[in-house]
Image (spheres, grey):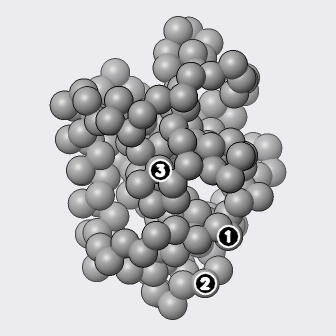
Amino acid sequence: MRTENPIVKQAVIAAEKKRRCFGYLFYGDQLKDIECKPVPQFPGVTTLMELFAVLEKCWSRETAYPSCQADWVPDDPSYGQCAITATLVHDMFGGTIHKIRVDGGGTHYFNKINGQYVDITREQFDLYDLPVNYEPNQEISREYCGKNKNTYERYKQLQRNIMRFLS
């Protein structure tokens, strides 16, 4: 943990203490210490781990995909958050955004950074023991994720949630 921001430090401690179904923080957490481009609005968020810990505190019913909002609960905060989270990870850490079809016909978004898949929202599937196969997948553009007005609005709301949490 690199941050000097006490709010981020506490979020990281909480994330590390949380009991996880499969023993990892998120899929691809081997890259948890990778550093991001500085984001002045997110003081103290400098690594993927710090972003993950802050997101667990900032995801909300309002930032979830509309069809997921009725079932969203704080115990499963990543539920319905994949598109906006993959976009935010891309904006901060680079790499590429990918999408796959999951059981039930839904679409799931995640990232590839330095040649490795990273899925910050994987836990939404792990909690219900649903398999996620990352290949085959489709690489998509950043613009694709933001073309839906609702997705763009939820992305902006997530940014506001993070700024409010860190202030």
Query: Of marks 1 and 2, which one's residue comes earlier in the chain?
Result: 2
Nearer the observer, 82 or 125: 82
What is the x, y in percent for residue 128? 66, 28
Q: Which picture quadrant has residue 98?
A: top right
> Disc 2 marks which residue?
2
> Disc 3 marks which residue?
90
Q: Is residue 10 visible?
A: yes
Nearer the observer, 93 or 165: 93
Q: Quadrant of the C terminus?
A: bottom left
Is residue 62 depicted above or below 104 in this figure? below
Image point (72%, 55%), residue name? 29
Residue 5: assigned label:
none
Q: Residue furthest top?
A: 105
What is the x, y in percent for residue 124? 58, 35
Image point (28%, 69%), residue name? 163
Secondary structure under the numbered disc 3 in the rendered image: helix
Image point (42%, 75%), residue name? 38
> Disc 1 marks which residue?
33
Q: Do callouts 1 and 2 mark residues in contact (Cβ within 8 Å)?
A: yes
Which amino acid, by three-letter code, is at mark 2?
Arg
C-alpha separation, residue under disc 1 versus residue under disc 2: 9 Å
